[in-house]
Image (spheres, rainbow, N blue to C red):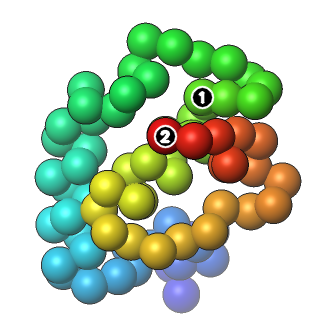
Amino acid sequence: MSAADRRGSRPRGTGEEALRLKRVLESAEAYPFCHRYAYWPGPNSNTFAAWVLRKAGIRHALARRAIGRGYPC
């Protein structure tokens, strides 16, 4: 097992998911809060991650401790 595998950074998911993520990340300027940042309650980096996953159609709940995860966007 390589060091990357032990850290959990090994890419996962289907090819289709990867393509959807790529398209969303290439159009990150469409993020509605790209010029605004607030640690609490958001928008912040967790809000951005949730937005990217949602736009890519990937169901993934952020950790309960992820500040800003419930910020509406």
Residue extending furthest front? 72
Name the mark on residue 73.
2
Q: Residue furthest right?
A: 65
Above or below, 2 against 34 in this view is: below
Q: Amino acid at mark 2?
A: Cys
Q: Amino acid at mark 1?
A: Pro
Front one among 54 and 12: 54
Q: Is residue 56 above or below residue 48?
A: below
Is 44 or 72 nearer to us in this picture? 72
- Residue drawn at (62%, 68%) of the image: 61
Q: Determine whether the residue tagged by mark 1 lies in a helix, strand or loop.
A: loop
Residue 15 position by quadrant: bottom left
Residue wearing tag 1: 43
The residue nearer to you, when weighing 11 against 19, is 19
| Label 2 to label 1: alpha-carbon separation | 8 Å
Left or right: 59, with 67 as reference point:
left
Mark 1 crowd level (few <14, some 14–19, many ≥20, 10 Å Cα): many
Residue shown at 32% from the left, 56% from the top: 55
What secondary structure is marked by label 2?
loop
Contact, CB < 8 Å: mark 2 with mark 1?
yes
